[in-house]
Image (tube, rainbow, N blue to C red):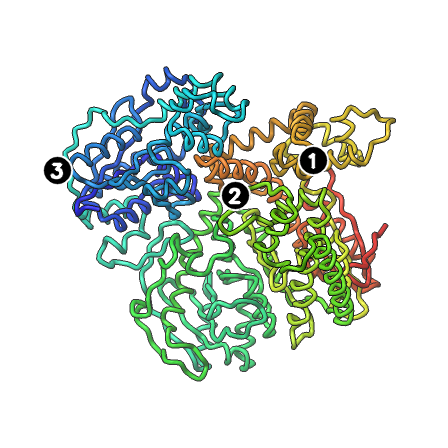
């Protein structure tokens, strides 16, 4: 670019993007600020990256009358602006004023046209331009002098488009994009385009003919005939959509380039504005270092360094524990942050019970001194002070390993931050207390006044003890802000009744583990090796030669070149695709594809479980222990790793064989499994309030047979074929995952036309389900998120994406997440209830694993009837629904051998 360059900002698009990308944030007075905060972060990033000589922000000021005249439905589907977003545009204008950035808007015109006009004028002045937007429509402006930066996900994932990038993405030149949009339409702007022509076909046609006008002038050359007929019928509409899509370059804008030259803004002016808006996490960059930032839990909260010290002699430690015990609150952080209950690397604990004061206590004397051990145990067990911690599960696990009970906690900052912003998963400590990685913690040099030994001593306190103590101080001071955000987001019940009580139970489940029958695994390994060899030989026989079965390139050549199987897709530079999405349809008709899928399944299970599990047995406990991740999925579901015990297939023979090797941790006990029956379908019936489904579940009928009768018109005395029930089952489960006719055709083995007709019949028979689905998607589009029945949120910014595939995926998530998330919340709550019931009854039975809708217990044989009764009561009454909750039970000496219990 030239030395002078202009940054043109599509302000409206960026503010919208920020609003739906960030969780709700407000000032202490309740003023919403998430969109304004996110806009400032994007603005700050672009200023640093582009280093522009000129910066201009453009706003929408209406929709041009000629566009509505050309396409009356243009933007008619746009929902009303969310109430919390509208007032933030004034804040954004104040931010731009603080930076000294001029605003351009033209009455009755859109920001895209202002930007296109300014880009044209800038070129005439030999100014290169960078446009930043959330709108792919502006890619038509890209040329040798204009680059467009587009937001993809959130506020930090940006894509930069030059001519080559546009060509790579669309296969078209930037100047062809309006023609392309005219053909395919754009649902986000309610542009119809040509019905039946999607993105791929549109791009192919424009690339082949060069322009829309050339295409429409040569319809006799268009193949297939169906496309040509569509173009004849809808050609005028395509032209209208194309004309509406073209950005205007000649608006009456007088650009004051000399006066608009960008200069560094006044730090004092920005600091005053950020203080007023409570953007204190941004103050360190503009206030000359008058406080290190801590954007606590995405809430702007200031952080000032304090006095931190190490206490490493018994009298000083005893005094610190006594002071902490008499305080209303104490924050506790094991140092360094622990990875799991099995690690022994926590060498010290940081404690803070007064703001701007904290201590680091070496762990060794707490474990070895009886007096200190008792004092620390009393502090942990007491109801007061309230305990503020980070990662309560691993804390409980580590303390339990060393003979301490973790006691009740008032706040787990990791869980609070994780449910406020589910995209974070299980955030690290610095991420949990800040809105941006790396913010919020003072450096060792800035950690404040320190007293005591800060070199590495005999207790291993470490040479960064001031910083370590500062984390406990930050944790203590973050508590109110995090709890306030949790309450304002309606997440109180999720945090306080589900996630926090669950944490110590998960720690005990991890420690309990399973015994493994290594002899059984050896027998399984031998059997699998025989199977793999037999299947491999069968594949070689069908292929007529031996080749590397694990090489996609070699496999593609055999299947699609030598054997001539249909590929379903063009050959790429790296070869043919041979994934399951390609092989599964082929397996219905071609034996070699079926054998390849079998080979892959058996080989994966052998390497992932049969070969790996013996190596993961703990040498101390001689048990297999998984690690459970409390916020492992955005829906709230638990996940499992090292090893993943939730992913062993239950319906395959190999999966069942592997489960035979899982034994109760205590010899002589049995494994009892309790499984919610069709829980997501039941929750979906409750959410949709469809009377027919509710009544069917209340009567305890086969829900899939019921659906088949309703959709196919099968009488009550007629038999239902297995095929009819299978199709009904596929659509029942598919509906809650937002299934399409294509997806149903794939899963149920029917034609796409039949699948489309089946779905239409389903919605006609159950209109309340269709109404619920449409309503939940529309609410999600307006709010930016969906919620479970317990209030857990899942944010879906891609509901407003201009990319069809991303928008469609978000719509499917909007339909599924409330039911799947409620099911995850429900079984977590049931786990807590079961654990409390076992404790109250004095049982030795213990919960050892959760596999989504199933709980697995290690139970002494004589306790099975009592444990079963307590589990049934806890699970079936965990929440009240319009339909009954039903739990099925099995029990046996191994996980696989568990048999159904009456």
Name the residue that disc number 1 marks: 732
Residue 444: mark: none
Most extreme residue toward the right is 717
What residue is shown with label 3?
Answer: 259
Quick one: 208 or 397, which is closer to the camera?
208
Q: Who's the residue at 59% across and 74% down the image? A: 402
Q: How far is the residue under mark 2 from the one under mark 3?
A: 45 Å
Q: Are marks 1 and 2 in contact (CB under 8 Å)?
A: no
- Name the mark on residue 794: 2
Ranked by sequence position, the earlier of labels 2 and 3 is: 3
SS state under label 1: helix
Q: Quadrant of residue 856?
A: bottom right
User: What is the x, y in percent for residue 383?
Assistant: 55, 61
Q: Position of residue 431 (x, y in %)?
A: 42, 57
The crowding category of the residue bearing disc 2, from other C-alpha atoms within 10 Å (few below 14, some 14 to 19, many at least 20), is many
* Residue at screen point 38% across, 66% down: 470
First along the sequence among labels 1 and 2: 1
Which of pointers 1 and 2 indicates the residue nearer the eye?
Answer: 1
Mark 1 and mark 2: span between their CA atoms?
A: 23 Å
> Going by the image, does 434 lie left or right of 122?
right
Q: Name above or below for residue 405 compared with residue 131.
A: below
Q: Dot 2: what SS?
A: strand
Is residue 842 visible in the rendered structure shown here?
Answer: no
The image shows residue 745 at horizontal and vertical percentages of 67, 35
Q: Residue at x 43, y 21 (%)?
A: 218
């Amino acid at each position: 670019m030239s030395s002078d360059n202009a940054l043109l900002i599509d302000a409206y698009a960026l503010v919208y993007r920020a609003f739906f990308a960030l969780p709700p944030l407000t000032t202490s007075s309740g003023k919403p600020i998430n969109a304004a905060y996110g806009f400032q972060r994007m603005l700050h990033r672009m200023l640093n990256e582009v280093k522009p000589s000129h910066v201009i922000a453009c706003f929408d000021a209406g929709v041009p009358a000629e566009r509505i005249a050309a396409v009356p439905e243009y933007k008619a589907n746009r929902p009303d602006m969310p109430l919390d977003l509208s007032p933030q545009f004034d804040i954004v204008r104040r931010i731009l004023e603080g930076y000294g950035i001029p605003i351009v808007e033209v009455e009755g015109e859109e920001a895209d046209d202002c930007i296109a006009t300014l880009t044209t004028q800038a070129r005439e002045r030999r100014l290169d331009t960078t446009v930043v937007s959330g709108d792919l429509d502006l890619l038509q402006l890209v040329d040798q002098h204009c680059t467009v930066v587009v937001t993809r996900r959130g506020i930090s994932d940006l894509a930069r488009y030059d001519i080559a990038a546009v060509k790579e993405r669309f296969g078209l030149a930037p100047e062809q994009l309006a023609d392309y949009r005219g053909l395919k339409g754009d649902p986000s702007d309610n542009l119809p385009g040509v019905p039946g022509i999607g993105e791929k076909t549109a791009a192919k046609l424009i690339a082949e003919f060069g322009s829309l006008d050339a295409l429409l002038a040569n319809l006799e050359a268009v193949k297939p005939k169906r496309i040509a007929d569509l173009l004849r019928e809808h050609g005028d509409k395509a032209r209208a959509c194309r004309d509406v899509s073209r950005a205007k370059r000649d608006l009456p804008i007088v650009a004051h380039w000399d006066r608009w030259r960008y200069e560094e803004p006044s730090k004092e002016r920005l600091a005053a504005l950020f203080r007023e808006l409570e953007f204190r996490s941004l103050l360190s960059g503009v206030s000359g270092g008058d406080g290190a930032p801590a954007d606590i839990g995405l809430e702007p909260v200031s952080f000032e360094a304090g006095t931190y010290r190490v206490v490493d002699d018994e009298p000083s430690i005893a005094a610190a524990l006594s002071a902490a015990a008499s305080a209303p609150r104490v924050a506790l952080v094991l140092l360094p942050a622990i990875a799991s209950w099995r690690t022994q690397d926590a060498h010290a604990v940081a404690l803070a019970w007064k703001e701007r004061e904290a201590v680091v206590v070496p762990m060794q004397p707490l474990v070895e001194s009886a007096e200190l051990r008792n004092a620390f145990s009393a502090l942990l067990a007491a109801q007061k002070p309230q305990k503020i911690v980070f990662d309560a599960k691993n804390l409980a696990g580590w303390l339990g390993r060393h003979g301490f009970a973790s006691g009740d906690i008032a706040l787990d900052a990791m869980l609070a931050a994780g449910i406020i912003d589910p995209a974070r998963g299980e955030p690290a400590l610095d991420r949990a207390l800040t809105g941006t990685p790396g913010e919020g913690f003072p450096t060792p040099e800035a950690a404040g006044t320190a007293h005591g030994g800060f070199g590495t001593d005999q207790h291993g306190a470490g040479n960064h003890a001031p910083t370590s103590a500062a984390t406990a101080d930050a944790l203590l001071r973050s508590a109110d802000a995090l709890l306030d955000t949790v309450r304002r987001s309606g997440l109180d019940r999720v945090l306080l009744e589900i996630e926090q009580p669950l944490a110590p139970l998960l720690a005990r489940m991890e420690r309990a583990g399973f015994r493994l029958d290594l002899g059984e695994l050896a027998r399984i390994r031998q059997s699998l090796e025989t199977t793999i060899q037999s299947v491999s030989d069968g594949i070689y026989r069908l292929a007529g030669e031996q080749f590397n079965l694990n090489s996609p390139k070699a496999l593609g050549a055999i299947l699609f070149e030598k054997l001539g199987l249909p590929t379903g897709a063009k050959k790429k530079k790296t070869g043919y695709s041979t994934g399951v999405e390609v092989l599964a349809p082929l397996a219905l008709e071609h034996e070699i594809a079926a054998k390849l899928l079998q080979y892959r399944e058996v080989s994966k299970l052998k390497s992932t479980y049969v070969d790996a599990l013996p190596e993961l047995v703990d040498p101390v406990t001689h048990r297999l222990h998984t690690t459970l991740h409390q916020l492992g999925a955005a829906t709230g579901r638990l996940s499992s790793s090292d090893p993943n015990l939730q992913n062993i297939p239950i319906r395959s023979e190999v999966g069942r064989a592997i489960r035979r090797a899982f034994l109760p941790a205590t010899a002589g006990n049995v494994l009892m499994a309790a499984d919610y029956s069709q829980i997501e379908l039941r929750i979906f019936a409750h959410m949709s309030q469809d009377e027919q489904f509710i009544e069917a579940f209340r009567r305890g009928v086969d829900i899939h047979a019921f659906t088949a009768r309703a959709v196919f018109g099968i009488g009550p005395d007629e038999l239902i074929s297995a095929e009819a029930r299978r199709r009904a089952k596929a659509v029942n489960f598919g509906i809650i995952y937002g299934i399409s006719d294509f997806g149903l055709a794939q899963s149920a083995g029917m034609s796409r036309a039949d699948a489309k007709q089946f779905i239409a019949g389903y919605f006609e028979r159950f209109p309340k389900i269709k109404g619920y689905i449409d309503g939940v998607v529309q609410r999600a589009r307006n709010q930016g998120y969906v919620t479970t029945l317990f209030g857990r949120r899942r944010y879906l910014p891609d509901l407003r994406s201009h990319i069809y595939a991303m928008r469609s995926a978000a719509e499917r998530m909007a339909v599924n997440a409330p039911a799947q998330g409620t099911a995850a919340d429900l079984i977590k709550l049931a786990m807590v209830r079961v654990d409390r019931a076992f404790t109250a009854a004095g049982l030795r039975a213990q919960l050892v694993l959760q596999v989504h809708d199933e709980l697995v217990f290690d139970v002494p044989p004589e306790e099975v009837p009592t444990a079963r009764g307590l589990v049934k009561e806890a699970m079936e009454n965990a929440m009240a629904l319009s339909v009954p909750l039903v739990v099925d039970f099995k029990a046996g000496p191994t996980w696989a051998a568990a048999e159904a219990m009456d």
